[in-house]
Image (spheres, helix red, strand yellow):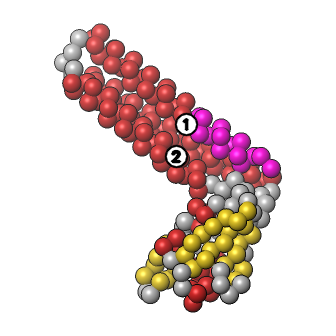
Amino acid sequence: MEEMNFILEAAKEGMTQAIAYLEKEMLNIRAGKANPIMLSSVKIDYYGTPTPLAQVANINTPDARTLTVQPWEKNLVPDIEKAILIANLGFNPMNNGEAVIINIPPLTEERRIDLAKLAKAESENAKIVIRTARKEANDEIKKFEASEDIQKNYEIDVQELTDQYIKKVDEIFSLKEKEILTV
């Protein structure tokens, strides 16, 4: 039965990875509030090397609608401003000589609906990964030389695991949807 438990653990691990990936993707979907993660895709040319913005500056949120980027070297301020514009995030950075200030515009109703659809698509992708892990586990269980009752019991365990993880995906989505649609 050790092999069967190993199959269950492998399925659980795959499903856990799907949840972790979904949570990461949900952080990238902005819900109207300023968050340093919004700038995670911005790279700056730092001495000839494309470097993530967070490695050359402090990114803070003084309030819900503002991001400040305080570089460790003042001469990087214009480069940071340019990199944010090039990243095409829809932000209009302002340079005060010492830091870059970004005012986050409020989301339009249409944009909120689009973001909610994007969050729904990401959660559907996570469900597909979870169901794939279930299918692989069930296929492995069927390969084993065990009684039909034992196989059925393990298939039931795999289904219960799948249901738990699908429920987690739905919870993550509903929280994100509420966050996005709340004005």
Residue hosting label 2: 22
Distance from label 1 to label 2 (Cα)?
A: 8 Å
Task: Say few, some or many: other residues with alpha carbon within 10 Å of mark 1 (under 14 / 14 to 19 / 20 or more).
Answer: many
At mark 1, the secondary structure is helix
Decide which of tag 1 and tag 2 comes sooner along the chain: 2
Q: Is residue 120 magenta?
A: no
Q: Are marks 1 and 2 in contact (CB under 8 Å)?
A: yes
Magenta segment, which residues? 170-183
Identified at 44% across, 33% down, the residue is 131
Q: Is residue 176 magenta?
A: yes
Residue 86: tell me if it is visible. Answer: no
Lateral position of residue 117 relative to residue 160, left or right: right
Task: Say few, some or many: other residues with alpha carbon within 10 Å of mark 2 (under 14 / 14 to 19 / 20 or more).
Answer: many
**Residue 86, position in %: x, y?**
61, 78
Identified at 36% across, 38% down, the residue is 13
Res 10 → quadrant = top left
Residue 76: tell me if it is visible. Answer: yes
> Residue flagged by tag 2: what amino acid is it?
Leu
Which secondary structure type mostly characterizes the magenta part of the structure? helix
Lateral position of residue 118 relative to residue 48, left or right: right
Q: Quadrant of the N terminus?
A: top left
At mark 2, the secondary structure is helix
21 w.r.t. 162: above or below: below
Residue hosting label 1: 169
**Residue 170, position in %: x, y?**
59, 34
Res 30 → quadrant = bottom right
Q: Residue furthest left?
A: 145
Identified at 49% across, 32% down, the residue is 165
Identified at 69% across, 53% down, the residue is 31
